[in-house]
Amino acid sequence: MRRLLSILIAAAALSTAADLKVAEDGRLSQELADYLTREAATHWTARHTTIAGLRNARDLEKRQQEFRSWLTKAMGGFPAKTPLNAKITGGFARDGYRVEHLIFESLPGFYVTANVYVPTNAKPPYPAVLGTAGHSLSGKAISTYQYAWIGLVRRGFLVLAFDPPGQGERSEYFDKTLGKSIVSIGTRQHDMAGTQCLLTGSTFALYEAWDGIRAFDYLLTRPDVDGQKIGVAGNSGGGTQSAYLSVVEPRLAASVISCYMTGWEQLWTTPGPQDAEQDFPGFLSAGYDFGDFMLAFAPKPVTMLTGIKDFFPIAGGRATFAETKKVFSLADAEVHAGYFEYDDPHGWSKPRREATYRWLTKWLQGRDDDGAEPEIKPEEEATLNTTKTGQLATSLGGETVQSINLRRAEQQFAARSVLRGSNPAALRAALTQVLNIPARSGAPAVTDVASSSEADGKVTKLLLEAQPGLHVPAVLFEPAGAGKRPAVILVDSRGKSASSSEIEQLVVKKTAVLAVDLSGWGESAPPVGASGYSGDWQLAQRAMLIGRPLPGIQTFELLRSYEWLRTRPGIDAANIGVVGVRDGGMIALYAAALEPRIASVTVKEMMASFMTLARAKLHKDRISSVVPGVLSEFDLPDLALAIAPRELRLQSLRNALGAPLGRAEVEREFAPAVAHYSNAKERIRIED
């Protein structure tokens, strides 16, 4: 066994971790990327065919209704409307307009900070515009957006500009002691809470869209607003909101979407998926694309404003507009499909603001306008604060996306389906569905890459073809000796090279070990992400967009690895266990719950439960482990229902930040699991 141990010892050193490498650098990472791209391409190609098959206004209306229903459900479903409790907290006057400071509640205790720009150079009732702010530290108050609001109000529009959650006065992670947010404003706050929203089958987009719907409701309470002439305009993240409101708010009369519209075929690779509210699980597999946000608004006037140098690819914008114009013609509304591009980078630049003015004056005021922006002096940002302190966290307090989602999580957890159908078969069915696990048939094809035999055993490097064109790199350690050997499949989310000590301990006990790198880990780990997003984030989002959550792909790969190991001569097929480390522990649990022949399960340093994540104020790098909508079905401890009475060992479980949990907390999380074991002391073990 000396040779085997020398390999393991060498692999434990970072400088020689290549001893466990199976493929050349980057090959498997690119293979995974290519696999996801092929899957995505089948969906956008099918959509092209569907759109080309629309023949008349009735076909278009049917698609609009289907998309509106799908998007509403994908966001998480809208709640019942509650009192807005709107209050004007102050304001000031300027030449030709005044600004009112407004706070309203889109949900009870969920405060929205807003500015109302009211013309004083025109007669009410005014046409109005919902001003949706993009990703900026200052939200509604950043100077770029002030230019747009003031440019509109001077043209006789009443403008309601509001902060999205996590921006401006609505920082959701503001630390009173430090006097600043502990999570970067904007996308990072959206991603932090948005990851938790996925657990409940909702998204961060739900809260942004609902704020916009309730802002529309507020405008209807004002006698100085013409309720039949309310539009929406926004840029970047505000353009995202404009696009969504164009689908879910049918009362809108006109829409402007700036620096957001493109196509997934062009965005997919570079720069790739963006922040939490811009990615819906199953969006592509359901047959949708950016163009559906435009088509949903027909026959009403909607325009897309683009930048040739924008990171949202201009080629996608052009292709989407060509499709939009053609489909709008089915409703005799081709003139209502607008497009503007300018040779500049991302942002609500002056040319795009002027295009905004032209579009809204034409369709909400019934007149042509050259769009020339007057000279504008933005306010100091603090002048636009609606709270006394400039932050809700230090003035009114109130709810956050995380706190509202937690209540939703608690409700789902209390009523999860595993409680209604408390049997292993029902749990396996739910697990197969939420992970989208394909059917398995036989052992996968395997390529031997290299092997080394010594007197004390054999080491073999392998590539297992889990799915056509997608390989799992693996190293098999087989101690020498006659007869059948017990075996363990080891999966570590840090990569197989990180578990050399674990492998060594097993090999010493004369146990064969198959160490695998599942998709996204080890040798197939994604490269650095683009546009400020990590490779792990973008990989997980790509997988969810095609309806194949990454944990589902990984679980299928682990099951396929198990099927192959069973066929290996010298392996006791009835005595194969799985050991999962960190997020690998979740995959080990899934695989063992789905495959009754797996003999035992050991998980180490795994996050204890999805409710641990839902309850956390902060978490770290959890997107890769999230399964959309999982809490309505089960939580990780529930998987013991399908694993019992096989041995289950839980070692050093963690919280959502990766810190060890105390034994009492782990026992509390896994109390339902213990109940499934008739001899819990021997068959389920909780260890520090």
Image (tube, helix red, strand yellow):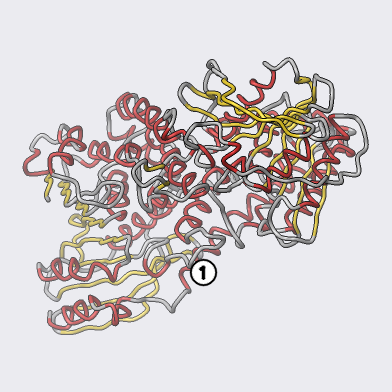
Residue 522 position within the rendered picture, expressed as x and y whole percent measured from the top left? 36, 67
Q: Which residue is farthest right?
A: 368
**Left or right of 199: which side holds 249?**
right
Expressed as whole percent of the image width and height from the top left, the position of residue 324 reads 80, 43
How far across and how far down the image is residue 130, in percent?
Answer: 69, 32
Q: Residue at x 41, y 36 (%)?
A: 402
Residue 1: which quarter of the image? bottom left
Is residue 520 found left or right of 312 in the rendered image?
Answer: left
Q: Left or right: 469 with respect to 217?
A: left
- The part of the image, by quadrant, that contains residue 461 is bottom left
Q: Is residue 370 visible?
A: yes
**Mark 1 highlights which residue?**
30
Q: Residues within 10 Å of mark 1 (few under 14, many from 20)?
A: some
Residue type beneath disc 1: Gln
Observer able to see residue 66: no
Q: Residue at x 38, y 63 (%)?
A: 521
SS type, badge 1:
helix
From the viewer's side, name the closer residue of 494 and 185: 185
Work out whether residue 492 or residue 207 is closer to the camera in this orientation and state it. Answer: 207
